[in-house]
Amino acid sequence: MKVGVVGTGGMGNAHARQYHKMSEVELGYYERNLGRGETFRQNWGAHLCNSIEELLDWADVIDVCLPTDAHPEFAHRVIEAGKPLFLEKPIARTVDAAQAIVDAAKAANVPLMIGHVVRYFPEFALARQMVQSGSVGKPAAIRTRRGGPAPTGSSGWFMDHSRSGGVLLDLAIHDFDWLQWTFGDVKFLYSRSVGATTGHGPDYALTTLTFESGAVAHVEATWMDPGGFRTYFDIAGSEGLLEFDSKKTPALKTVTTESSSYEPSLAPFDDPYFLELSAFLASVQTGSPVPITGEDGLVALKIALAALESAKTGKVVTL
């Protein structure tokens, strides 16, 4: 299968690293930044396409790893070409743009999967499984925490919240998606955010979600932690408590006179990005529904934008 990647920045390379493990995949790419594209080609042995049209002709499926505000333009071009589309999260910057992508894919009968990869992280997948099986009884209170230092991205696009949406739309949306998937519909929420008032730069947000079930979630997301990236959750229910903290996960640490590093705790084929992209390609090959649909991406986006609205207005927002 020929996989065409659009965008060879952080996520484009993260995805290419996984495709490189798949013997059945031939990787191609299109990149406007020639220097970055050449590095991508050298790293992954990918086939260079000099235009999006050439990539669409060459590829069987397309993987879009561009800044959020560029998603609609390229998503519609892929859909119009009739090629299955993997689109990184968030699906788009606005609800209208996201809905248009979902509607176009449905009308064209084009498979569309959104990259909410947290569903494939083993701790989060197992926690959902345990909640669904009743291991903690009736869920009452959930806390999540995600973040680290501020990302920059090409031309500093992450720090321009008109493009990225800030930490709520780009980072907390991971937890919003997982929480909705695990605990059901959100009834209303309240959020505060540093970036909601500045509109640019590093960001921190704290959001309280109340679910239709009555459970309450406390969601912390930050681009203002120089101590390194960390994820955390705990789930309290009538029958027990689940807790995970990435800072406490055992790992092999290698220390030399020059540096120290942690070895990955997962085998190469258990990497969440590998599982996510493999599931997408399998659904394309078999004609089965994609695991994370455009509608799933739209729901997560609506929660994130509601949180952003709450942070800007200082009011509770009902979904």
Image (spheres, rainbow, N blue to C red):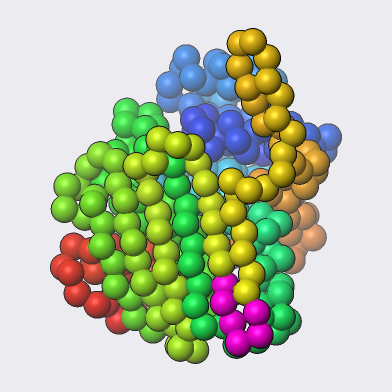
| Rendering coords of residue 229 (x, y %) | 50, 41
Residue at the farthest right position: 23
Residue drawn at the location 40% of the way across and 59% of the way down: 220
- 22 or 208: nearer the eye? 208
* 99 to 23, vertically: above or below: below
Is residue 148 at least partly visible in the picture? yes
Magenta range: 235-240
| Rendering coords of residue 246 (x, y %) | 60, 49
Is residue 2 at least partly visible in the picture? no
Q: For residue 236: magenta?
A: yes
Residue drawn at the location 52% of the way across and 46% of the way down: 230
Location of the N terminus (image quadrant): top right
* Quarter location, residue 46: top right
- 56 or 284: nearer the eye? 284
| Rendering coords of residue 248 (x, y %) | 63, 48
Residue at the farthest top position: 257
* 12 to 47, vertically: above or below: below
205 relative position to 12: left or right: left
Location of the C terminus (image quadrant): bottom left
Residue drawn at the location 56% of the way across and 67% of the way down: 234
Residue drawn at the location 35% of the way across and 66% of the way down: 207
Q: For residue 125: magenta?
A: no
| Rendering coords of residue 269 (x, y %) | 80, 43
- 113 or 319: nearer the eye? 319
Magenta stretch, main secondary structure class: strand
